[in-house]
Amino acid sequence: MKKTLVKLLALFGMVLLAASMAACDNGSSDDGDSAGLAYTSTGAGSTATGGTVYSGSMTVDSTAYTTLTMQGDSSSGTAVLSGSGASISGSYARAVAASAATTAYSGSYTITFRFGTITVTFSGSIVTLVSGSVTASGSGTLAVQASGGTGGTSSKTVTTVFVKMDAGTFSMGCSADYDETVHSVTLTRDFWICDHEVTQAEYKAVMGTNPSSCTGDESRPVEQVNWYDALVYCNRLSQQEGRTPCYTISGSTDPADWGAVPTSDNATWIGVACDFDTNGYRLPTEAEWEYAARAGDTTTGTRTWSGTSSESSLGSYAWYSANRGGSTTHPVKDKQPNAKGLYDMSGNVHEWCWDGWTGSGGYGSDAVTDPTGWTCSSRVVRGGSCWDYANNCAVSTRLNSVPGARDYSFGFRVCRSAQ
């Protein structure tokens, strides 16, 4: 009888991801030239013509990769890894004990990631017999050596670029569904918008903490931040850079005077005033956000996304449910930008906007100038996330949330009025 390769993954320290929308899977490792990668292994193997095949999803160093397939049931075999930003090479040797109750495996794999490579040496025994198919699981820790990078938490360097959006008029919305009635919007102010979502590293540098669930790489977008948190971040960043803060609460622009950040509706904080004529950082209005996301795309009869009007090519521009590869966000600026050089405006994390929610249908069909939404507690979020289907990542799709909500899919990006 042939033996399954199901537990072989555990032997060389991979982390198999049990994908879940309930929370981010963060993995576990220590910084340094060598690291202990905590792992769990669950999956299924089956005997087939040509050998035993294992396939599943996995996470290594807190980053998700999809479709790991190992095959070969003779004296040696190979592994194939497909996913984002990683490749695998190597082989294993297999020796069947005389009792046919135990199969011993040993070998070495080199896995190349965007931040370097790790070489994993594995050995061990699989004692599960297979007849047709089997499921198995295991857990433990395996030491690995790293070269050309680190075997622990690693983040890429993110360069901050602000893209200037000139004042103009555009058609906002989409007639394909209820998202928003198509209407003409005129923006009278030039503004600068960041080319990426605020990262965990950037947030921590300003706020002193990283509240995110999807940790392990601080070039991922910050999440678990509510609308009020974003206001505090914007004013603090403005203060750090010597800019004039935009937001005023109870007569003060200093967040130190505002008190604790609320986690529910708060009339004082909801009454915040925004001075759009200062040079400080702020959240984009909903209209500014869509104007930047469209980047000149005039499609209004069908859904369109930031960077493409074709759903078939969306995976090149966005992390969304079809390609996220696990229950986690991804580093910013890993996908292609839109025509203005803006990244992740579709997918990865939802982005808070300044506007109060105007209800489904948006602003109606009348032409408007510099709209900022209604005065209400609920706030607009745009862009969809890596947990959303393509429809929710369209540039016209409108969602909303109470301002005190902190969620693993909620982040933001900043902009500032041009002076």
Image: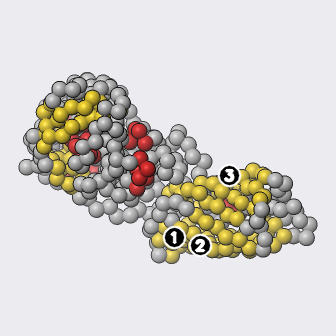
- Name the image quarter holding the N terminus: bottom right
Residue 89 circle label:
2
Upstream in sequence: badge 3 or badge 2: 3
Label 3 – label 2 distance at C-alpha: 22 Å
Eyeballing the image, is 378 above or below 16? above
Residue drawn at the location 77% of the way across and 62% of the way down = 49
Return the residue at label 3: 42
Q: Secondary structure at mark 1?
A: strand
Provide residue 12's location: percent of width, then percent of height. 65, 66
Return the residue at label 1: 112
Pointer 3 local density, CA inside 10 Å: few below 14, some 14–19, many at least 20: many
Q: Is residue 214 visible?
A: no
Residue type pointed to by label 3: Thr
Residue type pointed to by label 1: Thr
**Outermost residue, front side:** 301
Front residue of 234 and 294: 294
Q: Secondary structure at mark 3?
A: strand
Q: Secondary structure at mark 2?
A: strand
Label 1 – label 3 distance at C-alpha: 23 Å
Provide residue 388's location: percent of width, then percent of height. 45, 41
Pointer 1 local density, CA inside 10 Å: few below 14, some 14–19, many at least 20: some
Q: Kindly check if marks 2 and 1 are in contact, taking CB atoms under 8 A apart as contact.
A: yes
Label 2 – label 1 distance at C-alpha: 9 Å
Q: Kindly check if marks 3 and 2 are in contact, taking CB atoms under 8 A apart as contact.
A: no
Q: How many marks?
A: 3
